[in-house]
Image: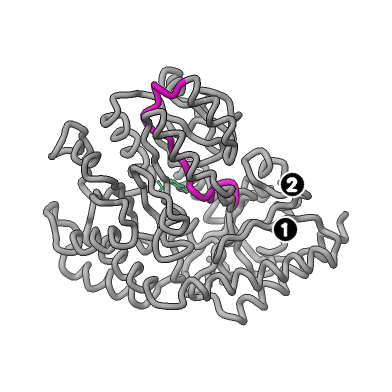
């Protein structure tokens, strides 16, 4: 069994001084039945070491950003060099311009960009901007998609009923929840119906163009093109939340992969190379509404800070090298094929959604294309699997709704080690049933 004495000790102290012992609820182990989350003290490449000196292969990648593995030399160097010259100026810097150009080159619909500090801020601001631009109040989103923790988007965001205006969080005024319309992902009929009812009041249709928040769920063919067409026919802007997806699957975003352009885009995670960042952008004509050019206010003391920008430039530059994404996909495919084969061998029912270097494993007998499908996957079996994998030295996200993320740091030995761990986990699960 895993030795976790120090994690337990630290968790007891954390519970006293940090609410729930964690600084983000997704880090807690409550969803996987375990009480004590593992406290990490060091990370390098594809590995974590915890406070009890256990080593883990990391497939969490910090919920997405760590695509180059931990402490990547070029990112680390950029952070160190930058820190030595001061970490925050409150003035513009050359690197912000350089980075904005890099991003626009990769994602041309982001004609103008503004950097912020998190994905939450980026999405929150695209909504305000869509409202400012259209003069309308409502937004439409898809059930189960998570867009950060601002008031509007916590409606039907990963756990609540996909019904009009029912908030998932306490503290959200009904008057705000009333402004949100939610329809199932990949359901064009539901979208048409909602736009038929409320189309002339909707400022923006907010979508994860490929879902990363109830596992990996790709759009059905034509879904994104139809979202664009129907939204624009209703006079609403299309907002892509590419916080998880940008630079995860290819050098660019989902919009440049499928060749569909939204009006506004929100970014985060990978573009900061592991440091806090967010960005939003779109057509100049829309971005002209943002202060100091226009009437929509948005600001930030830390926005575009030299550390995040330098780390982001180093990370995106490393991702531009040939072969990076092919290699990520190849490693993921090796894992997916092995997991499917072992599942068959041990009589474990599961289905896997893979997109390039990321995939999600659902203990379910049906293909998952929407949030309801993801909810029906067994939480109990995932919890067992998670705990057995942890004990074997493989760190997965502690939720059945999260993905496995490959990094450039994972080596063939790590993949083989992981496959052996999966076999042991499945063996134990088969014995229990
Ligand atoms: N949008 C999406 C699609 C996300 O996955 C997340 C975070 N998981 C966010 C927005 C919020 O980003 P942050 O946690 O940086 O505020």
Per the model, the C-alpha gap separating discs 1 and 2 is: 11 Å
> Going 58% across and 70% down the picture, which residue do you hit?
57
Residue 261, image x, y percentages: 38, 48
- Does the rendering let one see residue 59? yes
Quick check: is the Cβ at mark 2 less than 8 Å away from ligand 1? no
In this figure, which residue is indicated by the disc labeled 2? Answer: 378
What is the secondary structure assignment of the residue under circle 1?
helix
Q: Nearer the viewer, residue 341 or 187?
A: 187
In this rendering, the answer to whether 196 lies above or below 326 is above
User: Residue 293 is drawn in which quadrant?
Assistant: top left
Task: Look at 39% across and 41% down and name the residue there.
Answer: 239
Specify few, some or many for label 2: CA neighbours under 10 Å numbering under 14, 14-19, or 20 or more: some
Please report whichever mark, 1 or 2, sits nearer to the chain's N-terminal start. Answer: 2
Please give left or right for residue 26 compared with residue 285 in the image. Answer: right
Percent coordinates x, y for residue 325 in the rendering: 48, 71
Q: Judge the density around disc 1: few (<14), some (14-19), many (≥20) Cα neighbours within 10 Å.
A: many
Q: Look at the image and give the residue range highlighted in magenta.
A: 198-215
Kindly identify which residue carries mark 1: 385
Residue 185 pos. (x, y %): 57, 39
Please report the residue visible at 67 percent of the width from the left and 47 percent of the height from the top.
Answer: 368
């Amino acid at each position: 069994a895993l030795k976790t004495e120090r994690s337990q000790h630290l968790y007891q102290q954390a519970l006293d001084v940090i609410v729930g012992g964690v600084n983000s609820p997704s880090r807690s182990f409550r969803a996987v039945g375990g009480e004590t989350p593992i406290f990490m003290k060091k990370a390098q490449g594809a590995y974590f070491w915890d406070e009890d000196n256990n080593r883990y292969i990391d497939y969490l990648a910090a919920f997405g950003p760590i695509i180059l593995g931990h402490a990547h030399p070029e990112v680390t160097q950029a952070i160190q060099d930058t820190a030595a010259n001061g970490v925050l100026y409150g003035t513009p810097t050359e690197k912000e311009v350089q980075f904005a150009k890099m991003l626009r080159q990769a994602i041309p619909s982001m004609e103008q960009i503004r950097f912020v500090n998190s994905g939450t801020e980026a999405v929150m601001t695209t909504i305000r901007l869509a409202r400012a631009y259209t003069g309308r109040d409502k937004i439409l989103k898809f059930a189960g998609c998570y867009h950060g923790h601002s008031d509007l988007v916590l409606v039907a965001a990963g756990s609540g009923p996909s019904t009009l205006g029912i908030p998932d969080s306490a503290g959200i005024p009904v008057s705000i929840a009333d402004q949100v319309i939610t329809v199932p992902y990949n359901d064009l009929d539901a979208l048409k119906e909602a736009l038929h009812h409320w189309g002339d009041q909707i400022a923006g249709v907010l979508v994860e163009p490929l879902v990363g928040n109830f596992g990996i769920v790709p759009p059905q063919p034509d879904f994104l093109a139809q979202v664009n067409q129907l939204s624009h026919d209703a006079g609403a802007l299309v907002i892509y939340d590419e916080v998880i997806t940008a630079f995860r699957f290819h050098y660019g975003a989902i919009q440049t992969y499928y060749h569909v352009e939204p009006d506004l885009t929100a970014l985060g995670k990978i573009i900061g190379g592991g440091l806090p960042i967010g960005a939003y952008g779109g057509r100049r004509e829309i971005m002209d509404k943002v202060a100091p050019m226009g009437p929509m206010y948005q600001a930030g003391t830390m926005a575009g800070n030299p550390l995040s920008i330098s780390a982001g430039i180093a990370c995106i530059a490393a991702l531009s090298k040939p072969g990076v994404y092919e290699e990520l996909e190849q490693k993921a495919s090796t894992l997916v094929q092995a997991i499917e084969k072992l599942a068959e061998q041990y009589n474990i029912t599961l289905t896997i959604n893979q997109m390039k270097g990321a995939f999600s494993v659902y203990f379910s007998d049906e293909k998952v294309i929407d949030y309801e499908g993801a909810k029906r996957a067994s939480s109990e079996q995932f919890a067992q699997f998670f705990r057995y994998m942890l004990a074997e030295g493989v760190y997965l996200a502690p939720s059945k709704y999260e993905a496995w993320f490959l990094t450039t740091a994972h080596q063939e030995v790590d993949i083989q080690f992981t496959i052996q761990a999966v076999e042991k986990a499945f063996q134990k699960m088969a014995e229990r049933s």
